[in-house]
Amino acid sequence: MDKKKALLSPAARGRAVKGLVYAFLAVWAVIVLFPFYYMIMTSFKSAGEYNSEAVPSLVVTSPTFENFFSAFTTVSLGKYLLNTLVFTVVTTAIMLLFTVLAAYGFSRIRFKGRDLVFTVLLALMMIPTELVVITNFVTITNLELRNTFMGLILPSVTSVFYIYLLKENFSQVPNELYYAAKVDGTKDLAYLFKVMIPICKPTIITVTILKVIECWNLYVWPRLITDREDMYLVSIGIQIIRESGFGRENIPAMMAAVTVISLPLIILFLVFRDKIMAGVARGGTKG
């Protein structure tokens, strides 16, 4: 009888529930990660080994790096990666400058109509991105910026969501610090760089990483604004590779190209995953 009571105790039930939750998460993780595992394993197979398999094998018996060399020598994967790197770094840097300054202005500087302007800015989040693509396309075309990095970058240098996220984080910093700095004669920009940015570094890192991921995966706008292969980003380049004979005839080489493109983002997330979670949680918490 005592054993049955022990099994039915709140602590025992809690452990059972926790075990079920962990088991579910483990199964779900396997389901989510399996495509990545299969992609990586296939990238190390030779074309002959892959084509000879009646049932796809999950283990590579004779790994080869030939597919990775082919991805860089047969197609312009290196050029696509370089274009994407330039686009991502420049866009993220400009976006950070605008976002930090805008978030600081809305959180600390008092000016007439501040709350109204911020409300209107938030209302822009309700507009689907697809609705402004045509307007941006016409504007960039009229400015003769098609097939240029400037045309790629300009529509992506602002983000209402990131301004809101960082503004909420800035608002959590006690006002007493700001007033004390003003009494000491500290300018707003000096206070921003010496106090606000160091305190809110986790959220700024999170915004930076999320923007890098967004730029790396961007497809619709680069597809519209570029039609020269020397300006393609990896999102377009991988589609071109898939549609070409290289991607259709040599699946392992195609998987190698996808692995190379995916690897930077995977490493970025693994290295900064704790800061991403901490930044998002902190940016969305009031008080």
Image (cartoon, helix red, strand yellow):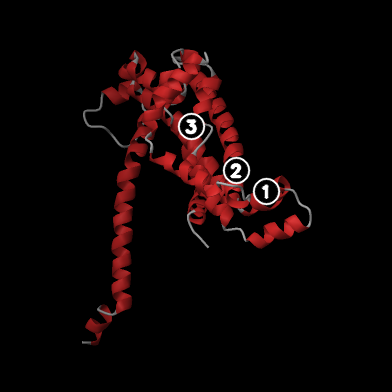
Q: Secondary structure at mark 2?
A: helix
Query: As shown in the figure, which amino acid type bears the numbered disc 1?
Result: Leu
Q: Position of residue 181 (x, y in %)?
A: 73, 56
Residue 100: give its label. Answer: 2
Cα separation between marks 1 and 2: 9 Å
Q: Which of the 4 quarters of the picture holds residue 122?
A: top left
Q: Callout 3: helix, strand or loop? A: helix
Residue 237 in sight: no
In the image, residue 238 lies at what x, y percent? 40, 23
Q: Which residue is mark 1?
A: 192
With respect to residue 147, does 278 lie above or below?
A: below
Residue 282 seen: yes
Q: CA distance from mark 3 to mark 2?
A: 18 Å
In contact (CB < 8 Å): disc 1 and disc 3: no
- Which residue is drawn at the image coordinates 55% and 21% (left, top)? 150
Q: Residue at x 32, y 47 (%)?
A: 30
Residue pictured at 60% horizontal, 43% vertical:
100
Amino acid type of the residue that numbered disc 3 sits on in the rendered structure? Cys
Q: Earlier in the sequence, mark 1 or mark 3?
A: 1
